[in-house]
Image (cartoon, coloured by chain):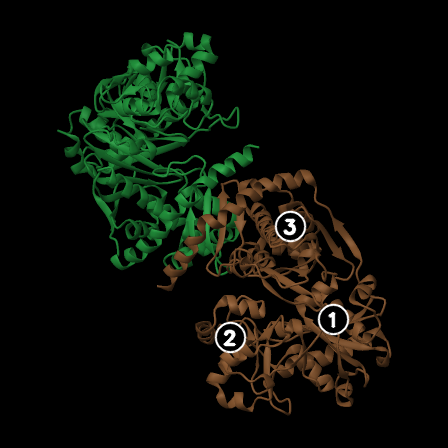
Chain colours: A green, B brown
Amino acid sequence: MDVGTTGCKAVLFSDDGRLVSQSYREYPLYHPKPSWSEEEPEEVWRGVIEVLRETVAKSRIDPVEVKALSVSAQGEAFTPLDRGLKPLYRCVTTWDDRAVEEHEYILEKIDRTRLFKLTGHPSSPVYTLFKLLWFKRRKPELYGKTWKFLLWEDYVNMRLCGAPAIDYSLASRTMMFDIEKLRWSTEILDLADLDADKLPEPHPSGTVVGEVSRRASEETGLAEGTLVVTGGHDQACGALGVGAIHPGPAYVSTGTVESIVVASDKPLTDPRVLSMGYASYCHVAPNRYLTLGANPTAGVLLRWFRDKFGREYVEEAASKGVSVYDIMVKEASRVPIGSLGLFVAPYFMGAGTPNWDTYARGLVIGLTIAHGKPELVRAILEGVTYELRLNVEALEELGVEVEELRTVGGGARSPFWLQLKADITGKRVVVPVITEASSAGAAMLAGLGAGLYKSLDDALRRFYREARVYKPRMDVKRSYDRFYGVYVKLYPRVKDVYKMVFDLLRG
Amino acid sequence: MDVGTTGCKAVLFSDDGRLVSQSYREYPLYHPKPSWSEEEPEEVWRGVIEVLRETVAKSRIDPVEVKALSVSAQGEAFTPLDRGLKPLYRCVTTWDDRAVEEHEYILEKIDRTRLFKLTGHPSSPVYTLFKLLWFKRRKPELYGKTWKFLLWEDYVNMRLCGAPAIDYSLASRTMMFDIEKLRWSTEILDLADLDADKLPEPHPSGTVVGEVSRRASEETGLAEGTLVVTGGHDQACGALGVGAIHPGPAYVSTGTVESIVVASDKPLTDPRVLSMGYASYCHVAPNRYLTLGANPTAGVLLRWFRDKFGREYVEEAASKGVSVYDIMVKEASRVPIGSLGLFVAPYFMGAGTPNWDTYARGLVIGLTIAHGKPELVRAILEGVTYELRLNVEALEELGVEVEELRTVGGGARSPFWLQLKADITGKRVVVPVITEASSAGAAMLAGLGAGLYKSLDDALRRFYREARVYKPRMDVKRSYDRFYGVYVKLYPRVKDVYKMVFDLLRG
């Protein structure tokens, strides 16, 4: 299972690592206030039930043949439940900023460095900790009635087998988990005066925590007795899905957002990790940590361009029956390297790692009257990819080897963009056969729990194969080195302007 | 007469300053090499003849009633003619860069500061001096055969009355005229080894230099004996046309390019004038000098936006039968002050005065995914107008009072943009009744020469009246002060990036 923000997916894999069948359901997000973001737990659970039924049905396999299940889950999002598992409130998701004051309150008691050392995350109101505190302070009665605050992995596990079991990677995303001691942090819970027994039970990923109950079997169509195994945070499962559990390969997911995950033996503790905005926390692989960087505006910029400036592209796509992005990228591919001196810094929603700046905004520099739509699209793709190179270089500077980029997501469907990644970063770029990386990672953990594999490396030998490889063309790389040399100078030059604009608009 | 780069215009005024009739003809520019720019002298002359005939015919006035004529002319452009007035080459115009090497050659012999002191112009290959030297060095035979190199004022005067008479303002635009001694600079001519007798005869503006000959009368339909009076450079005539011959009012012409002209008693000699790119040279008013600043990319940016991103606006304009710019500006007018934190620095063809940087390129900063076409159009208009404020402030810092902006050109047809000029600069913005400012200025000089007016001030009392006035709204001004405060910080931050991009693209 993969339970995401806007939909869930069930994917059935054979023990030799073939994708047998899959099914997907969307569910809505609710915004009772513009900056709040909630899901209806029953709608998500209904989605889970439906995709499980559908995936097994599509496979034409007897449900008893399904050995085990693990959940890959979105981070942070949680639901308060009573003892009878009745939701006492909607699920509060990551992109909900209700807990800004609670965040400030905690930061008065503990500094960011200590919080980072304990949890591996740069502090931000997105994390579960602050939202739990919000409930405790603003809905004390509801807080009192709450038996458990469950994230989606533990919620699904609870519904399937009665164990509110979370793994270490997803637990890390709450900002309450001690990533070295591997248990809820009493230091943090004490600060916030929160009760540890209202939290799920942490286990290593790949641990059998129960079996599908009769009732759950009736609901989901899974066979009673199917093993329920701890999975992980979707970024961690995705990294496992492409084999990024040892130093070397990086997991790059290019969608609306672009993320990069690398593995290491220890969490990264260099103070720059915090200031660059990386999270460095428990991996789903035993005794491994992952470091996660992200650019919040990757594919979303192509959508922005399509919606705001691309009506002609949309019309052409409709008349030809092809994807509008294919048309945009094709036009961009005809523009010379470096977009005729045009640069786009994609900070339309702030700068992600490693510049890490919530004030930052989009920058376009180098415009002449010769520039039009194709040049802008190419400059957007180049800018997003320069950000990926910034991340690769920052991670290498922090001591993590990045040998190649193993990439999935919508961006991995564009050969032009994949080659651009190789040419700009100078790394080998690989698209795996199985691009459902989070689901594959969860399935490997399920198989490990079920005893099908001796180790995750054993599982990977069956699941991971290269479908397509893009190698850097060294002449193009040399050209891009020169453009990148200018690109890296842009942010430091205008950094203080972003804060000025922020202050200006605040009044 | 107004003889411009792409067309010429004849405008007939009554002695009490009413515009009686006018006529316009376009003529082509030729580009034998991409960066060369030429006009065919006979085509221009045919245009002159046609508009003169047509304007008099439209007026239904007996040609003998037309007392006098003066020419307002584009700067720099000149034609080599033999003794029989046969063109020996096409007219070479301003935006022709053939003389880059000759420019460098002269700069090895004399420094920019001295050249500026003598001529009032920051050195550049656009000026006539370097192109004359080009002929002398590369076409020595043609140079030898040339009787006169004439600019358009003196060419027309010569054809009408036999006197190759140029005025001081247009002579200044050759970079060979000593603006203090008011004669051709022997220092400069000696440096370039050019013959002063191949140049036209300089006279003050408003000097009667002859009468329309019988032959010219037959060609043009003007009456024999009509007085031919020296006019001036089009920027100088335009400034006179709106009364900018004393310190106080500035002449602002907003078209493809936006220019600003202010008058003073002496040329400005502050070294910053040169580094900011201002030209400070002879005015058409006696004992007056003008200072000229310009933004090379004003209206041209709206055209760029229309052509590259505005198909929907073009379609809407066609279906409604209105101007596409009206639609663009209307949408922009609905966006809040400051375009939601979006800034556009309009340096798409380099920065004009006062940042004066040929390497500069367009900059867009502050983008979020909320920004689309209307916000960009507004940010373009705001950016162009911030540049106007930069010029107003720079001129004031250099000691020239700017009390109000008297504005003409396409940009003066937009009430929104006019109010924006007032709100951003904090100056009263006036659109005069007669917006054909260069023609009006030439007509005043003709009238002065013909003895109809005691002085140019006397002429102005009849010609200049306010049609519409836009006053700064102080609350809006205060808001814009804050946005402008951020805007002025942008160029210094990224100045060195522009040179890097230039070097990058050169190879």
Residue A205 lies, in percent from the top left, at 23, 24
The numbered mark, 2 or 1, whose residue comes first in the sequence reads: 2
Residue B204 lies, in percent from the top left, at 71, 74
Rendered-image quadrant of the C terminus of chain A: top right
- Indicate whether A83 appears above or below B464: above
Rendered-image quadrant of the N terminus of chain A: top left
Q: Chain of mark 3?
A: B
Disc assigned to residue B442: 1
Q: Secondary structure at mark 3?
A: helix
Task: Rate crowding at label 2 as few (under 14), some (14 to 19) or many (20 or more) other CA atoms within 10 Å.
Answer: some
Amino acid at pointer 2:
Trp
Labels 2 and 1 in the same subunit:
yes
Query: Tags 2 and 1 in contact by the CB under 8 Å rule?
Result: no
Amino acid at pointer 1:
Ala
Marks 1 and 3: which is nearer the front? 1
| Nearest to the observer: residue A132 or residue B157 | B157
Q: Secondary structure at mark 2?
A: loop
> Marks 1 and 3, how far apart in space?
33 Å
Disc assigned to residue B329: 3
Name, please, the residue furthest toward the front. B181
Disc assigned to residue A74: none
Q: Which residue is mark 2?
A: B36
Tell me if residue B79 can be seen. Answer: yes
Name, please, the residue furthest toward the left. A454
Q: Secondary structure at mark 1?
A: helix
The numbered mark, 1 or 3, whose residue comes first in the sequence reads: 3
- Indicate whether B51 appears above or below A258: below
| Nearest to the observer: residue A353 or residue B169 | B169
In this rendering, position of residue A240 left or right of residue B72: left
> Marks 2 and 1, how far apart in space?
29 Å
Task: Rate crowding at label 3 as few (under 14), some (14 to 19) or many (20 or more) other CA atoms within 10 Å.
Answer: some
Amino acid at pointer 3:
Val
